């Protein structure tokens, strides 16, 4: 069952996901996994924004999409495949390490 779901999600995400990123929640006290699916530009400031899909484990075909400033995301050092396996298995399968650095907040944030 998990293998079938992984293959289905890979087709779904790999066609549109550009990267995998952890997303800080609740004022950066916890993280969840998100997939960068695109980018856009804030017409008021010219800054680059990222569209991030946050899947709902263990059914990652549902979830939510959020928009983050580019400097708010972190590269965890994971491949998209590793992240998909982690989400579908509810964390049972996946990388043994992650690189997290708390983004520094500026007065604009």
Image (spheres, rainbow, N blue to C red):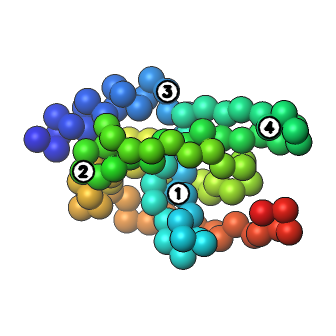
Whether residues under marks 2 and 4 lie with C-beta atoms below 8 angstroms apart, the answer is no
Label 2 and label 4: CA atoms lie apart by: 33 Å
Label 1 and label 3: CA atoms lie apart by: 17 Å
Q: Earlier in the sequence, mark 1 or mark 2?
A: 1
Reading the image, the residue beneath label 4 is 42
Residue 94, given in percent of the width and then of the height, sits at 32, 56
Label 1 and label 2: CA atoms lie apart by: 17 Å
* Residue 75 seen in the current view: yes
Label 4 and label 3: CA atoms lie apart by: 21 Å
Q: Earlier in the sequence, mark 4 or mark 3?
A: 3
Of marks 2 and 4, the one in the foreground: 4
Whether residues under marks 4 and 3 lie with C-beta atoms below 8 angstroms apart, the answer is no
Reading the image, the residue beneath label 3 is 16
Numbered tag placed on residue 58 in the rendering = 2
Numbered tag placed on residue 22 in the rendering = 1
- In what element is the residue under mark 1? strand
Check the picture and name the quadrant holding the C terminus. Answer: bottom right
Whether residues under marks 3 and 2 lie with C-beta atoms below 8 angstroms apart, the answer is no
| Residue 18 sits above or below residue 103 on the image | above
Label 3 and label 2: CA atoms lie apart by: 20 Å
- In what element is the residue under mark 2? loop
Whether residues under marks 1 and 4 lie with C-beta atoms below 8 angstroms apart, the answer is no
């Amino acid at each position: 069952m998990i293998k079938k779901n992984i293959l289905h999600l890979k087709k779904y995400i790999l066609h549109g996901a550009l990267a995998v990123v952890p997303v800080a929640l609740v004022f950066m006290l916890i993280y969840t996994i998100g997939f960068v699916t695109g980018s856009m530009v804030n017409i008021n400031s010219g800054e680059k924004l990222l569209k991030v899909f946050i899947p709902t484990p263990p059914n990652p075909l549902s979830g939510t999409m959020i928009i983050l400033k580019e400097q708010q995301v972190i590269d965890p050092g994971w491949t998209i495949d590793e992240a998909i396996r982690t989400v579908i298995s509810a964390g049972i399968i996946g990388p043994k390490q992650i690189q997290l650095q708390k983004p520094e907040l500026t007065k604009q944030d």
